[in-house]
Image (cartoon, rainbow, N blue to C red):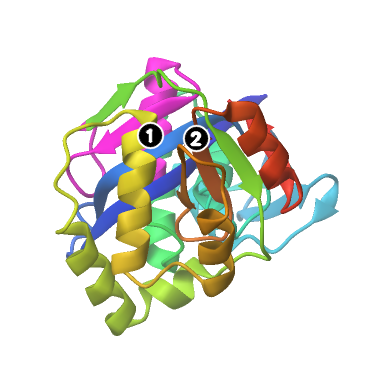
Amino acid sequence: MSFAPAHITLYFSIHDNVNILEKGSTGVGICLPLGVHATSTIKPSDSTSIKILNQNNEIDDPVTKRAVSLILEEPSEVVITLDRDLPVGFGFGISGASALSACLSISNSISSAHKASHTAEVEYNTGLGDVAAQAASLRENKFPSIAIRNSPGFNDSVEIFTPSHPFIVCLHGSGKSTTQILNDKVSTSKINKAHSQILSNDFSIPKIISSGLSFSKYADLLSPDLNKIISSLPNNSTATVAHLGTAIIASGENFQDLKNHLTSYGQIFTF
């Protein structure tokens, strides 16, 4: 069984390019020990057919299908079975993790799986940099990890660090459409302008969450609901939203108080 980690983007910049392998994003995020597990069955065939299952139910997942079609070496009947630890749409990079994990169930080459999955994500506008961070975390075998994406597109320029502070993820809200935001020129312009305001080179958990909150406000990506929750957190706490989604990521000195406070807003994961 293969695995690809979830990835939470805290702040980022969009880099457009006609070359799909150079199109992507730069920024900072966190890869989790939770993500997507995959198995595959493959039979030779005269033509390729790909079926995607999640918890034994067939699902419509064009990104994973496209990634799998790119990594296949010959026409085949393929059944991919996914087991997702986290839902799609909350800012965990699950579409990219699904594609990457599926490809890794077919090929043991992280580079080939990375290339196919990045291509599929960009083609469908469901993500720009998640796969780069996820592939780098897999290469380093570090979960959780802080991922710094220095160059956009398909490359291995991601720096990986082990976090030195604990943090909490709260599964809040009902999800958000990454594609809708990335297709909106006003939104993408705000995102790039907001990222230009984040100048810190401190990549500790408290600082990147704090920078993520500033970015979210600058980019107009923080809903009134999330703003109210974050403003109500215990003293010496910081939190922001996972992009592009609705989950909350938080850290603070009074960790147990912070955890107790967030429990009323959604399922809690601690790392």
Residue type of the residue flagged with mark 2: Ser
Q: Picture coordinates of residue 235 (x, y %)?
A: 50, 41
Dot 1 surroundings within 10 Å: few (below 14), some, or many (20 or more)?
many
Q: Residue at x 31, y 37 (%)?
A: 207
User: From the viewer's perspective, is residue 113 above or below residue 228?
Assistant: above
Element assignment for label 2: strand
Q: What is the number of callouts on the image?
A: 2
Who is closer to the viewer here, 197 or 140? 197
**Contact (CB < 8 A) between labels 2 and 1?**
yes
Q: Picture coordinates of residue 18 (x, y %)?
A: 18, 67
Q: Which residues are magenta?
A: 130-157
Q: Quadrant of the N terminus?
A: top right
Residue type of the residue flagged with mark 1: Pro
- Left or right of 128: which side holds 258? right
Compare marks 2 and 1 and give the one earlier in the sequence.
1
Who is closer to the viewer here, 104 or 195? 195
Who is closer to the viewer here, 15 or 44? 15
User: From the viewer's perspective, is residue 193 above or below residue 7?
Assistant: below
Residue 132 belongs to magenta span: yes
User: From the viewer's perspective, is residue 192 above or below residue 144?
Assistant: below
Who is closer to the viewer here, 71 or 3? 3
Q: Label for residue 251?
A: 2
> Does residue 262 appear in the picture of this structure?
yes
> Does residue 79 appear in the picture of this structure?
no
Q: Picture coordinates of residue 123 (x, y %)?
A: 39, 65
User: From the viewer's perspective, is residue 123 above or below residue 183?
Assistant: above
Q: Picture coordinates of residue 258 (x, y %)?
A: 61, 37
Gap between marks 2 and 1, in whole Å? 6 Å
- Left or right of 269: which side holds 106? left
Q: Label for residue 206?
A: 1
Name the quadrant containing residue 115.
Answer: top left
